[in-house]
Image (cartoon, grey):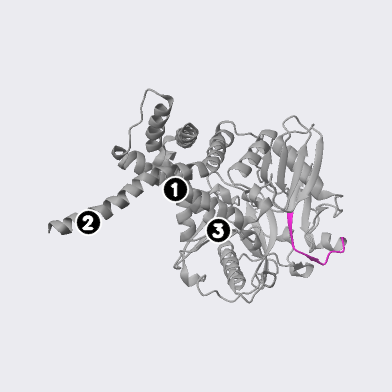
Amino acid sequence: METTLASKPPVKEGFSKYFRKNMYRWHRTVGIITLIPVIFWTLSGLMHPFMSHWFKPKIAKEFIPAKPLNKAQIGLPLATVLSQNQITQFKNFRLVSFKGHTYYQVKRVSDNLVYFDASTGLELPKGDIQYAEWMARTLAQDSVSRIKSIRVQTEFDNQYKFVNRLLPVYKVSFERPDGLDVYVETASTRMATFNTNSRKAFIWVFDVFHNWSFLDAIGNHYVRVIVMLLCLAVIVASTVLGLLIYGFMWGKFKKPRTDDKKGILKKYHRQIGLWVSFVTFTFAFSGGYHALKKWTPDNRLQFSYEPTFKVSDIQQASLALDLPWEKVTNLSLVQLKNQVCYFVTFKKEEESTPQPSLIDAQTGKEVANGNLLYAEYLANKFANMASAQADEEASIDCCEPTADTPNASINHANLVETAWLAKFDREYGFVNKRLPVVKLAYKTDEKTTYYIETSTGKLASKIENSDRREGWSFAVLHKYLFMEWAGKDVRDIVTLLSALGVLVVSIFGLALFLKKK
């Protein structure tokens, strides 16, 4: 019995001694490896609350409210105006009012927007540029500053990021001390975003030091994700080792002297490190989860339905429709299966936004529950398009959303919830940009929910359980939304202190490393 007991300790003690001897060196090594990434992430993270909250740039108006149409200025039916201008096919139309006139805004088959006076049918020269300038000046409440440039933006770039969602847009640049740029979508009369000099600087810093966009220049999207994940994994490893050394196994290490600089550094590195070890882990974990989710690019902009209409499709003139014109803010066209309909939007009431109506363009009769039916129709198209894209034998170019075949999972039988959203909520947040939308929740394994912007025929968002898990992780562990109850100021202060603690611990660790050398 004694021989057996005596034979075990050496192996056990040897491994334990080796682990204790080397774990401190491992902690120092991985800590130094991640020092630069931690400084990049914490400093750029510290800037975020200042630029997005406390010192957020402002613009005079963030949106142009929709007003009822002035029917007195609509003297000619659309079909007459189109025929007068030799247009037989087009993608859609709207009515816009500015500078005292009402115009038919017509989207041609070539995707260009042209403007015809609704009273005379005459085309407004460079109408889309004029409308973009009018929108920008209205939003900025600036009628005197010189416009430095107006250009169409068809791609996202380092100043107009994908988070803005809308394309194409006009970038209207003012010649002002603040360097104001206003991005407007003329097809929907809404502002996409605006940038001032300070905001441009912040976007650049955050993009370079937090999102590491510089890696895209030397590799690609996947290289950036891999490098970020590796760094975050090493940060987690360093945090765990530090927690073991300075927390659970501190009694097995030599205590630092408090009468020299090195001892003081080690003392505070340990104390602050223990305090911020949890937030370091949550920042790194949620950041890594978020980066991993970005491995599959967001392709929502591919999901859009814009059929081509003929003048003969609109036998029923819009002016002859029996509508409460004092409440109508706009008209356009949609195609529900083989039925061409007017899409009628109404003025916002006190606390609600009425759902649009669909009016048959041939008969003039309203389609019952038309907006919901159209949203379901689009969701089915987009689901079929996604299935076609997922097919290894199909190319993206072939997969236009034209198939009306009922989708196996996205169908009316599996539809468990519908809602008309005129405001953002916790699941469908501001980051999605588009409003109002129809929410369609389906009974699938992933609880698939589509958010459809019926006014444009576009997919605003598609959310499944995997998205909800990552969204919860990022909102709670990275952005500290669990502190919302205390107010945005308190939440941002807590976030700042957490990031600052991680930065201080890293700097103390660097000082210890240099002292050791």
Splitting the image into 4 quarters, where does residue 300 fall?
A: bottom right
Real-space Cα separation, disc 2 to disc 3, in angstroms: 68 Å
Instruction: Determine which of the numbered discs, if any, sits on residue 8 in the image.
Output: 2
Q: Residues within 10 Å of mark 2 (few under 14, many from 20)?
A: few
Q: Amino acid at mark 3?
A: Val
Instruction: Identify the mark nearer the N-term, 2 or 3.
Output: 2
Instruction: Identify the mark nearer the N-term, 3 or 1.
Output: 1
Image point 43% across, 48% down: which residue?
Answer: 237
Instruction: Determine which of the numbered discs, if any, sits on residue 438 in the image.
Output: 3
User: So how many labels did they put on this image?
Assistant: 3
Please name which of the two marks, 2 or 3, marks the residue nearer to the observer.
Answer: 2
- In the picture of the structure, the residue carrying the numbered disc 1 is 236
Q: Amino acid at mark 2?
A: Lys
Q: Is residue 99 magenta?
A: no
The residue range painted magenta reads 85-94
Q: Secondary structure beneath disc 1?
A: helix
